[in-house]
Image (cartoon, helix red, strand yellow):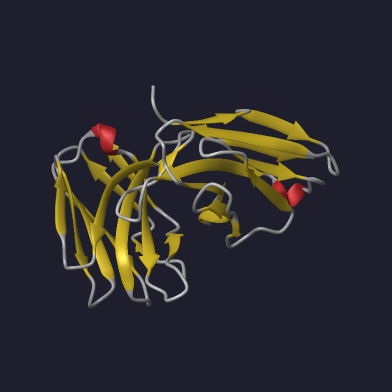
Amino acid sequence: NAGVTQTPKFQVLKTGQSMTLQCAQDMNHNSMYWYRQDPGMGLRLIYYSASEGTTDKGEVPNGYNVSRLNKREFSLRLESAAPSQTSVYFCASRETVRGGYTFGSGTRLTVV
Amino acid sequence: QQPVQSPQAVILREGEDAVINCSSSKALYSVHWYRQKHGEAPVFLMILLKGGEQKGHEKISASFNEKKQQSSLYLTASQLSYSGTYFCGTEEERNTGNQFYFGTGTSLTVIP
């Protein structure tokens, strides 16, 4: 099925460990996004990529890095995980500003 | 700036109607509505662009008053499948590039 694919679905990290969340979309969308979702706070933008070759910070970028590998793939890296990064992470893509976001199924990350 | 949603939570019996409101203090280019079921990703329902749109999607419709920077989502003759958390998202017009924010969500529970 066409859409946004995220891996892994679940992950437990120890404080200080690193990991990369992978995201790929097959809808030929230009823009891709990483959001985190915490209880009572809605979805907050971490980083986004308006087009291949560009990335920009969102509301909560500290502690994260991203790579737009090509038009399809956008990865999120935690270099040194902290308990405050325990959250559900969603990747999303969007064709244009006149369309909605399509979300991946999410990654539930726990940092202990 | 994060839009304000009201109410925070609502419980309905099957067949009843509900209205969810979304309000911003900024000039808006568009308003989005999403539904998220527990443990799943948000799903795009509709987008309303500036120009005072009203849109419908089966028994779920929405309006957008750009002068008041407000949008409302209308759910009529609710069904059990309508249960979930509804998020609005607002795209603010800025010279430096539009900014998008999600609201904190409205929990909707439909009971038999």
Give the residue furthest to the right.
Answer: A16
Q: Position of residue A77 (x, y in %)?
A: 71, 43
Q: Position of residue A34 (x, y in %)?
A: 56, 47
Residue visible at 30% across and 62% down?
A: B30
Q: What is the tally of numbered marks visible in this picture?
A: 0
Give the residue furthest to the top.
Answer: A1
**B102 relative to A16, above or below:** below
Q: In this view, does B39 lie to the left or right of B81?
A: right
Q: Position of residue B110 (x, y in %)?
A: 28, 39
Q: Where is residue B28 in the image (x, y as percent from the top left)?
A: 32, 70
Q: Quadrant of the C terminus of chain B?
A: top left
Residue A40 in view here: no
**A17 relative to A58, above or below:** above
Q: Is residue B5 left or right of residue B55?
A: right
**B22 relative to B67, above or below:** above
Residue visible at 55% across and 50% down?
A: A39
Q: Is residue A107 left or right of residue B38?
A: right
Residue A5 in view here: yes
Quadrant of the image occupied by residue B54: bottom left
Residue visible at 84% across and 39% down?
A: A17
Identify which residue, B39 or B28, lies in the foreground: B28
